[in-house]
Amino acid sequence: MNIGIYLTTAVPPGRQQAEILDSSLEYARLAEELNYESVWVLEHHFTKYGICSSPLVMAGFILGRTSRLKVGTAISILTIEHPVRLAEQAALLDQLSKGRFLFGVGRGLFSRDFGVFGGDLRHSRETMRVWLSIIQDAWRQGRCCGTSNLLKFESVPVYPEPFTVNGPATYTAAMSPATVEWAASMGIPMLIQHDVEDEEKISNLELYRSVTADHGHDPESIDHSLSVVVGVDNDGAAIRERARYYLGWWMEEAQRDTKIMDVIEEQKLADYDWHYRKWKEAVRKGETATAVRADKILRLNPIGTPEECIEKLARTIKATGISRIICGFEAAGERQDVLKSMELFEHQVRPYLPRQQ
């Protein structure tokens, strides 16, 4: 069982930005000490939902301060960057870390990012696919060129070549069926969300397997990652209350700053139709209120006593067959609460989780 952690770098009310970043580095240090497999950093802009504005910079810093941990981006927003620059930077991190860098990508949901950085929401799906193709050409062939209507440039050599054959291990956030099918056709492992019912996770995995087989990839060799929100405390009621407060604030911050649903409705963005339909369905069912969404995350994720966490996580692992778990511990509260939760998870939860073959 491979266990990693997310570093959201979210800044709740009353907390300081420098404190959050220092805490993030402390969580990464403890993750290596506890023999966790990986640390993943998120990318966000213009919001205290997360203040890591450059996941490659933060990943590089953590790689330089550790010796064993793998460090990944979850995600790097492809659609607001130039693909060749990303290919260069990721290959450089791969070389300097001797293969410890993991490249998680996605197309983004915060509409303001596109307005500021010049990305195109109307063509975000196509942009992501073209950009990743260019990046993979750079890593696998040592050269790339732009030949699409989105980006044209002559063939150029790309340096440095990556340390890892064919480039850093690549993952993608996959929520909609269209993205699941695309990831499967490419043989790219998925980063699976923490707020999805087990039945939907299973459905997406089944869809992925069926498409993957049609494209010549071995679905059994593809190692997906499951993200979970984790809070472990011997006082289950106390940890759930702290997590409920944190999650409520976190989701309100995202809803206020994303604005994607308003933009989808106003601009009729076909690339986000699935997200819009899911949101409208949730509105109809009365599931969009912050308190309701926080309760859903508390229900689905391992937050509680060690025994409660084992039960919830074991059920999801058995249902999905996934053996790479990425834990977001920051909902546990203050720094000392998060560190305690990480320790308890390592010693009182992880040893009792089912082992996948």
Image: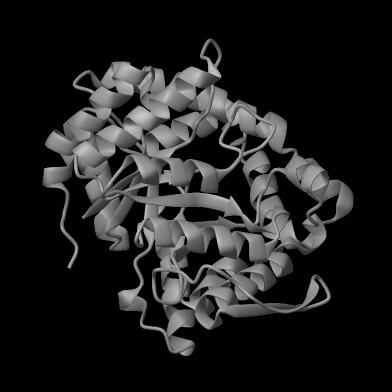
Residue drawn 81% across the image and 51% down it: 118
On the picture, is 301 further left or further right than 122? left
Residue drawn 12% across the image and 45% down it: 352
> In the rendering, at what x and y percent does residue 322 appear?
30, 60
Image quadrant for the C terminus? Answer: bottom left
Front residue (pair 75, 287): 75
Front residue (pair 2, 163): 163
Residue 200 visible in image: no
- From this view, report whether residue 168 is shown above or below residue 247: below
> In the rendering, at what x and y percent does residue 3 appear?
27, 48
Residue 25 visible in image: yes
On the picture, is 309 further left or further right than 278? left
Front residue (pair 165, 78): 165
Residue drawn 73% across the image and 61% down it: 124
Image quadrant for the N terminus? Answer: bottom left
Front residue (pair 7, 109): 7
On the picture, is 149 further left or further right than 49? right
> In the rendering, at what x and y percent does residue 164 appear?
39, 70
